[in-house]
Amino acid sequence: MATHVITGAGSGIGAAVAARLHARGDDLVLLARNAGRAKELADRYPGAQTLVGDLAEPDRLSWAFSHQSLPDRVDTLLHIAGVVDLGPVGDLTTKIWRSQLEVNLIAPAELTRHFLPQLRVTQGHVLFVNSGAGLNAHANWSAYAASKHGLKALADSLRHEEKPNGLRVTTVYPGRTTSPMQAKVHQQEGSAYDPARWIDPESVATAIITAIDLPRDAEITDLSVRPGR
C-alpha cells in the first residue's frame, strides 16, 4: 500500500486525485493551510493523516512540521495546490508577484526538501501539476506563468539530481480545467465561465494516476493534457 503526500486536496484536481487514491485504499497525507481545513479533509477522507502548513508562508513550513509527526514512509509527493492572479506587468505589485512565487514555486521546493529523505528510501515519485502557462506565457499572465516556468525548472533539475537515487519526477501540464481557480480566472478576465467547456478534473486525475502507477521500467517526465472540445 502506497503513501501519498498531497497538496491541494480540498478542491479541483487535488480533490479528484485524493478521492481516487483513498477509494483504492492507499494511505494519504494531506497538507492543509490551517487546523480548520485539516479537520474538513480528515472528515472527507477517513483514515487520512493531515499536516498543517501554509504554502503561502514557505519560510514557516519547517517550524510547522517540527511540531507535527511527519510520515515515516512516502512513496509519492503530489504538488497540486496553486494560486493565480492575473494582470498586466505595469499593474502587478510585488505582493502579487511574491504570493504566486511563494505558493506555486518556493513552497513546492521546500516541501520536496522536507520529504526527500523518505522518497529516497522508497525510490519514490515527485509529481508537479504545472499548467499550460508553464510552457507559454500570454498577456496578463506574467507572474503566474513565471512561477510555473520556475516550477518546470525545479522539476527538471530535481529529475537529474535524484535519478541516481531512483526517484522519478513528472510534470503534468493541464489546460484549462473546471475548478474554483478557473472560475476565478474567468472573473479576472471578465468572461463568462462555462465549466462544460473545460477539462474535467477527473480526466487530469487519470493522467496523474497513470504516471505514478507506471511500472518501474519507465518514467513519464512531461505530460500535457488539453481540452478535447
Image (spheres, rainbow, N blue to C red):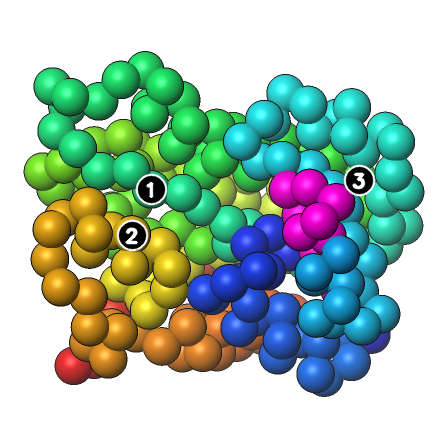
Relative height, residue 50 to residue 106 (above, below): below
Q: Quadrant of the C terminus?
A: bottom left
Mark carried by residue 184: 2
Q: Is residue 5 above or below residue 134?
A: below
Q: Mark number for residue 84?
A: 1
| Left-right relation of 27 to 23 | right
The tally of labels here is: 3
Estimate how packed mark 3 is, as few (under 14), some (14 to 19) or many (20 or more) residues with alpha carbons within 10 Å.
Answer: some
Was residue 34 drawn as part of the magenta stretch in this picture? yes
Residue behind mark 3: 117
Q: Amino acid at mark 3?
A: Pro
Q: Residue at x 62, y 75 (%)?
A: 19
Ranked by sequence position, the earlier of labels 2 and 3 is: 3
Tell me where the magenta segment starts and ends, as one range.
28-38
Q: CA distance from mark 2 to mark 3?
A: 37 Å
Amino acid type assigned to the residue bearing label 1 in the image: Val
Among the 4 quarters of the image, the one containing residue 122 = bottom right
The answer to if 72 sits in the magenta stretch is no
- Between 126 and 164, the residue placed more toward the observer is 126
On the question of residue 166 being in view, the answer is no
Task: Report the Cα–Cα distance between label 1 and label 3.
Answer: 31 Å
Give the residue type that dot 2 points to.
Lys
User: Which residue is drawn at the image coordinates 47% and 66% (left, top)?
Assistant: 13
Separation of marks 2 and 1 at Cα, in angstroms? 8 Å
